[in-house]
Image (cartoon, rainbow, N blue to C red):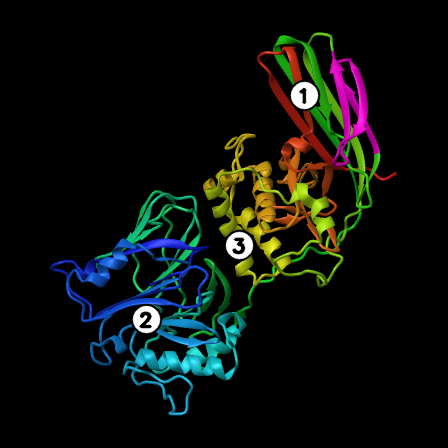
Amino acid sequence: MAQPPEGPLCSAFDLRCLHPGAARPDGWGLGYYPPGEHSVTVHKEAAPIHGSPQSELVRRAEHEESSTFVLHLRTALWGALTDANTQPFARAWGGREWLFAHSGSLDRRPAVGPDSLFEPVGATDSEYVFCDLLNRIAGRRWRSLGEADPDVLAGWLLELNALGTLDLVLTDGLDLLAWADRERSGLSSWILRPPYGPMSLSDAELGVELGRDGVRNRKGLVLASSELRISGEGPAGDWTPVPPGSLWLVRQGEVRAEAHPGTGMSAAPTPRRPRKLDRPPQGEPQRLEVLHRTVYRYAEPVERSTHLFRLAPIHDRKQALLSHALEVSVEGQSREYDDVFGNHVRRLEVNTPFTEMVIEARSRVEMLDTAPLPFRPLRSQSTFPLVWLPWQRNQLAPYLLPPELPESELRDLTDYAMSFVVRNDDDLFDTLMDVNQTIFQEYRYVPGSTHLGTTAYQVHVTRQGVCQDFANLFLCMMRLLGVPARYVSGYVYTGPRSSPHHPHAQASHAWVQVYLPEVGWVGFDPTNGILTQTDHVRVAVGRAYTDATPTSGTLFVGGRGEQLEVSVRVELAESG
């Protein structure tokens, strides 16, 4: 069994096979990497007794927090019942320790020459396979699985698979390689998807409690040679067999690369390379017309009030405001100004009673952000951590400060954000794209599930919300990584009225802009998993929603029983 989750997790392993009266295995072993370590901790026993002290230690899980666990229960077919023959096996290479476990049996052991860098200590076929793989990896001067070529690895494993049954996992602590036997796969996978409460996996031989030190709602991928029963508070999901003859490379709970060379020795591997998320193609300029209508109704008259309207689209080199008109049904004294973020604001002071206020903004905008990524590749500061000069940090300070949350919540969000950095080898832009895509794919859009006070942490835990919530989560994660980020409110064009996506354009929208060194502000829309281009109309920006809200105000006297009605229409403008 292998368990690589989306960040450190504390798991407790109950070896039920060592309970009184149970059929004991010929040996067992558990290996894991403590957080931030390249060395591996291994507990193992050959010919264990019922209720052994070692098994009680891993059941209590007093110190076992890791992103990768490998557990093996042995049925001896090769070698004596000794520690040297008990899996998982560990070896050091490339400045880190590697961990290996094999399920199955070979007809003969692969040859390992006396001059090889890695030689078996025991007599099992499994250790010979481990040493053979490490010798090949060292021969290529690959110091980690992240440097390895998936189709080359698959070719080697096909050769070894010809010697007998081969289901195995190999990890360097960061990546985990899984290989399913080419004839009859003995591996199954299960995805642990947040949100969830206490969860456990079990069968007659084993019980696993996930998150013994507290549920952290992290995504995980479990690989096992036998499907375990799933119980707990959360989406159970189904076990999925790993296709025969498949190689997976997993990092932080995500399959980063695959190879499916088939079942025949002559079949060439067909790899799926480590993903580089798609960059958007260059678009064409377009003109959009926006109608934003807001109606406030009150059961009791409002006698005195002030109102702020941020409804005029931004005018800059990426979008040109061709015309804008704002009409308010209630008369009052008004003035216009630019706020500290450069947003165009109209302030209205009303001293006459009213029970209904209709605010109607009409705008015509030419969208010019056809190429949000004019840099290929990113030439400056393309990896984490980002370094800012003192005057830059001073200017960007409002966009670098995360929201005020409890320390434990900020720590958990930091770990979550860092898992994307690790998954993408510290690459800045790949990390941004990955976070954007993950929120789009793994968080549910559920209108009415949140409110203005919902925090980024609550969105992370529940994995649901609306555009404002996803923007807040993205923004918080970026700031925790040292990437300046600001909240953007505006509109999005989703196609003609006949389009099935058109209803999504019937409300204002929210997304995030991040500031990239020597590039500037780049828009990310986690609700739709895209970069912003000529379909997104920017109206206001700020540190958070309160700085960029379209309409706000203060009712000094009266105004009980407020009802709000908002409608937005975004369409292509007619030529001319």
Instruction: Looking at the image, tell me whether mark 3 or mark 1 is earlier in sequence order.
Output: 3
The quarter of the image holding the N terminus is bottom left
Mark closer to the observer (3, 1): 3
Residue hosting label 1: 553
Q: Residues within 10 Å of mark 3 (few under 14, many from 20)?
A: many
Q: Which of 471 and 52 is in front in this view?
A: 52
Secondary element under disc 2, as helix, strand or loop, is loop
- Residue 73 is at least partly visible in this image: no
Q: Which of 497 and 428 is in front in this view?
A: 428
Specify which label sits upstream in the sequence, 3 or 2. Answer: 2
Q: Residue at x 36, y 69 (%)?
A: 185
Which residue is under mark 3? 418
Depth-wise, is mark 3 or mark 2 nearer the camera?
Answer: 3
Residues marked 2 and 1 touching at CB (< 8 Å): no
Marks 2 and 1 sit apart, C-alpha to C-alpha, by 64 Å
Q: Main secondary structure of the magenta part?
A: strand
Q: Is residue 143 left or right of residue 346?
A: left
Image location (x, y in percent) of residue 352: 73, 8
Q: Does the magenta stretch include residue 44?
A: no
Disc sitting over residue 88 in the figure: 2
Report the span colored magenta. Answer: 323-350
Whichever of callouts 2 and 1 sits on the residue coming sooner in the sequence is 2
